[in-house]
Image (cartoon, coloured by chain):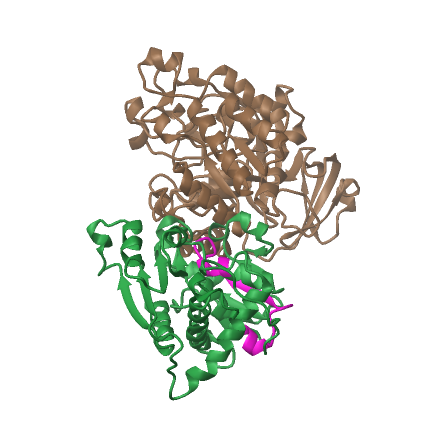
Amino acid sequence: MAVKLDKPLGKTAFVNARLLDPATGLDCSGGLLTDGEEIAEFGPKLAKAKNAAADATVIDCGGLCLAPGLLDMRVQLREPGESHKGTLITAGRAATAGGVTSLVCLPNTEPVIDDMSVVEFVARRARKAGLAKVYPYGAVTKGLAGEELAEMGMLAESGAVAFTDGVHSVNDARVMRMALLYASTFDLLIIQHAEEKSLAGDGVMNAGETSMRLGLSGIPSEAEVIMVERDLRLVEATGSRIHFAHLSTAAAIDAVRKAKARGLAITCDTAPPYFALNETAVGDYRTFTKLSPPLRTEEDRRAVVEGLKDGTIDAIASDHAPEDEDAKRLPFAQAAFGGIGLETLLPVSLELYHNKQMPLLDVLKLMTSAPADLLRLSAGRLQVGAPADLILFDPDRGWKIDADDLLSKSKNSPFDGRPVQGRVHRTVIDGRTVFEREV
Amino acid sequence: MSDAPKDIRYSQRHLLGIEGLSPEEIVLFLDRSESYVEQNRQADKKKTLLRGRTIINLFFESSTRTRTSFELAGKRLGADVINMSVSTSAIKKGETLMDTAMTLNAMHPDVLVVRHSASGAVKLLSEKVNCAVINAGDGSHEHPTQALLDALTIRRRRGSLSGLLVAICGDITHSRVARSNIYLLSTMGARVRLIAPKTLVPAAMERMGVEVFHDMNEGLKGCDIVMMLRLQSERMHANYFPSVREYFHFFGLDYEKLENTKPDALIMHPGPMNRGVEIDSEVADDFGRSVIREQVEMGVAVRMACLDILTHNQPDEGGRNI
């Protein structure tokens, strides 16, 4: 399992691999040499062990895919504040088991990441853990209360990579306008959870036939597109940038598609539940499928797939949200929103490839260089001199997701019991193997 | 000093703003102000030019320095000066702005000096009275005597306004000082830069022929003059900025940011200053570079010139060529 080497790093030669680099479209047999924490060299001529540097430790990849580690741009850590649901260490272990070498965490911890000291606390704890690299988002508003702007300028200086109120939308239009203006003063990105609160109300799942049959109060799907449309107007008027997180409806994706065609500086992502599941998964009140935004209709699910295929959706994030049994083993309406996703991000996303909806490199790009580019992080690509953050995975290997086998501290996976293909065999961060699966 | 042709005169009854003034008119005001600077430094400061004239300072918004400056200016010219502020007036009893104007008008003042928190209120009032009206600041619109005193301060230090690069920094959105200065400086051939977070400078400001910057270090590069504006801390609660410490960190004037300007750049502030908010105390008190106290001195001279020019410019003065 998770192995951490403390001895000085030498050279490691990964030979006999299928090299994949989504950023450049590279897909060939070859090898890769790491020197210390960095990528020293890679390409077809390093494919054979005999060509490896004499002083390098040789790892035979057995023809499996060697790719940049995944960058997961939406993860909820429960530390500080709710470490009974998850910690930086447990999330870090789940991440590396899922091939995620860098993750960006939401500011909805306790205390909230609306102060420089919390940014620094998270960064320091994550460095100490030595697992996946953690980049924090800062809060848009103080205490995520949606009222007063947080110190976005200084938060950015201390390491916040972008700004969001996490699982809340910035609901007040004037606050949002000021936030966009203020953020664009420093060329900072705001990430919006697009849901009009006054319309979503106390809904607990998508409003429609299933909610009607189950007798559950519904969240109308328009709640998403109304917020997206409003923000698009504000972005256009203020000349700022925005990113919409986990879009789930056909209407919102279409709104983004049209806005991109108009040339607005906008991006968006989605999460595996929204292209792999629909509202019928709620079935018999399964609280593990109670997500925010809620699982939508089959038409919406197909629209998400279309959005991924045509480039309207720029990234896939796990939307990892650990909740313990106390928060989930409740009547559906009272259960917490959210599902874990770090360990299922890759295999569920690879369904797009196995279903022949997208080429392998395009799927990987949505979890590597694409989110890195939109957050302006250097992660997610094979590059000489870049940190050696790598994964070795078998895209075809079949397995069945069993929540109890997942490393995440909380087990609330909406994909429990799902047969999938694609498994990470080894995860390397800064040249060190931090996860290895015994196959 | 005077480079204004002899036949130039100020043709308007009121001084409501800098917008629309010609360079010659501005020079006329500055030259006349200049003539009062020396007088104010004498032991005997009093003249009799405005003897028998009545000036009413009508302040609907609290002010100490502007009101005092106008009061001194009027008294030094020998006029009778009455101060009316909102707390002592009938406004609180429900009298409207226009009622007050008509009441005061019936008392036959010669000049009304008016400050009001609503943009355009001074102009509205000026349309209903028979005397000259000087705008002592209306909302976020104009503060013409402040721009004139700033210009006089700069001209005395630099000889001319033309060709100077002036940065105006801070809460531009709500600033009447900024608007009046933009008009005056651009009319006189200076180049103006505005520096503020995007929340505090409307994008449309670029239409006024200025350059807008959101980074203090960028914006201050090569500047001859740095004008800081007062930041009201209540703006924080309306989300114009998140905190005083963040504002000061990015937009407060300190020696580090000041290194970007020309080495001899002048530092100005219309007052009252918020030390540690928009300006570092050390910078504000820097004798070599800060001309903030000089601005206050020039204020009296400029207001004397305004009272002088306007009282001798009314129809019953036969349009005397001044």
Say which quarter of the image contains residue B112: bottom left
Query: Residue B166 magenta-drawn?
Result: yes
Residue at the outermost left position:
B93
Question: In the drawing, does residue B241 fall left or right of residue A374?
Answer: left
Residue A165 visible in this rendered orientation of the protein:
no
Residue A52 picture location, percent across and down: 75, 47
In this orientation, which residue lies closer to the viewer: A24 or A150? A150
Residue A109 picture location, percent across and down: 37, 45
Q: Residue at x 53, y 39 (%)?
A: A237
In this orientation, which residue lies closer to the viewer: A224 or B192? B192
Residue A37 picture location, percent across and down: 62, 53
Question: In the drawing, does residue B184 fall left or right of residue A44?
Answer: left
How many callouts does the rendering have? 0
Does A189 appear above or below A222? below
Question: In the drawing, does residue B221 fall left or right of residue B138?
Answer: right
Question: In the drawing, does residue A355 fall left or right of residue B143?
Answer: right
Does B275 appear above or below A424? below
Residue B70 picture location, percent across and down: 37, 70
In this orientation, which residue lies closer to the viewer: B309 or B251? B309
Q: Quadrant of the N terminus of chain B?
A: bottom right
Say which quarter of the image contains residue B78: bottom left
Instruction: Tell me which chain appears brown.
Output: A
In this orientation, which residue lies closer to the viewer: A249 or B104? B104
Residue A232 visible in this rendered orientation of the protein:
yes
Does A201 appear above or below B103? above
Does A203 appear above or below A140? above
Hue used for the chain lettered B: green
Q: Residues in magenta?
A: B154-180
